[in-house]
Image (cartoon, grey):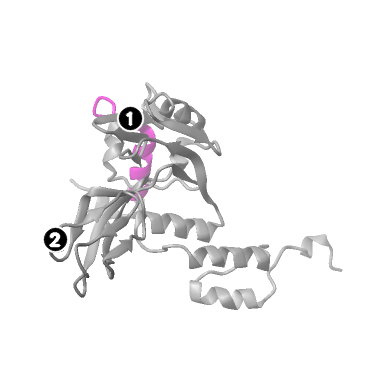
Amino acid sequence: MPNTSYLRQINSTSYADVAGLPFGLSRRVGESAISFVQRLYSAANSRRDHSYEGMLEELALRLGLGLYPGATITAPAGTTITTGFGQITVKTADVQNTVPTATVAADTYIEWRTLADVVADLNQIAGVNATLIKDVWGYQIARQKNVFLVQNEPISSQQQSLVHTGVRLDTVLFNQVTGTYALTSDGKLSLPGAPQAGLSMTYQYEVLPYSLVCSDIGLFSLTDPAINSLVRDGVLPYQIREFIQAIMQQDRSYWAE
């Protein structure tokens, strides 16, 4: 006779499963239709390409894991915040500060710091104020930067508000000669006359305050230059050597004489 050993969580077919086909996603065992639809909404607004951001979002979607803000950083205008493997750099004016998110022990083992400790160090930088939202380990801080590039934004009127604020005025480049123009950091553009057909503008803009993106996934590249900051006496950290060994067992192209 059937008993409890026959009982297990399974998915029944619903319209949600059909909706998942264009996204290349299917429900995991035991996942409800409502939760699956929420994943599909996330998929519709994700990059899902071969960039770092796209890979991180794709893995999070496939595994049902999260991306979320771990801390908020407030800093003076013109501040560049960059995260890499094992470190966060904050450049304000001509001063650059580096806060480690990992340290290397005497046996070359990587010891990851908590975001709470990192936030405490960020608050020691003049003009910077960081607030912890969710404490995570250092490897969960995604690679990111608070400065973004906009390419060829169309300019169609003499007085126009750009799509983004926080414009870095020294990065502005038009695809045509415009004459003398006025532009403010909050994206208010004023041209000397009606713009020519096809006029566009490329520029960088900064996001401040900035929400530091964290993830349930630790994703990095073995070619990341920031790994060099964790090399001690010419020796790679233990975990990095283990990662390379695992890859070499799968991909023979890593071997060399």
Q: In this rendering, does residue 104 appear at all?
A: yes
Q: Nearer the viewer, residue 104 or 52?
A: 52
**Label 1 sits on what residue type?**
Thr
Left/right placement of residue 140 relative to residue 144 reads right
State the separation of the CA atoms marked 2 and 1: 41 Å
Residue at horizontal 51 percent and vertical 45 percent from the top: 69
The residue that disc 2 covers is 179
Image coords of residue 135 (percent x, y): 54, 36
Using a 10 Å C-alpha cutoff, classify the residue at mark 2 as few (fewer than 14 neighbours), some (14 to 19) or many (20 or more).
few
Furthest residue to the front? 192
Q: Which residues are magenta?
A: 231-247
Q: Measuring from the top left, give residue 198's x and y in whole percent.
A: 21, 73
User: Quadrant of the image for the N terminus?
Assistant: bottom right
Closer to the camera in the image, 257 or 27: 27
Please identify, in this view, whether the residue under mark 2 or under mark 1 is nearer the observer.
2
Can you tell which mark lies on residue 98?
1
In the image, residue 213 lies in the stretch drawn in magenta: no
Determine if the magenta segment contains residue 239: yes
Which of these two is toward me, 143 or 196?
A: 196
Residue at point 56%, 57% (across, down): 64
Mark 2 belongs to which amino acid? Gly
Residue 12 is left or right of residue 87, and the answer is right
List x then y, in percent, for residue 230. 32, 31
**SS category of the residue bearing label 1:** strand
Quadrant of the snapshot with the C terminus:
top left
Which of the marked residues, 2 or 1, is nearer the chain's N terminus?
Answer: 1
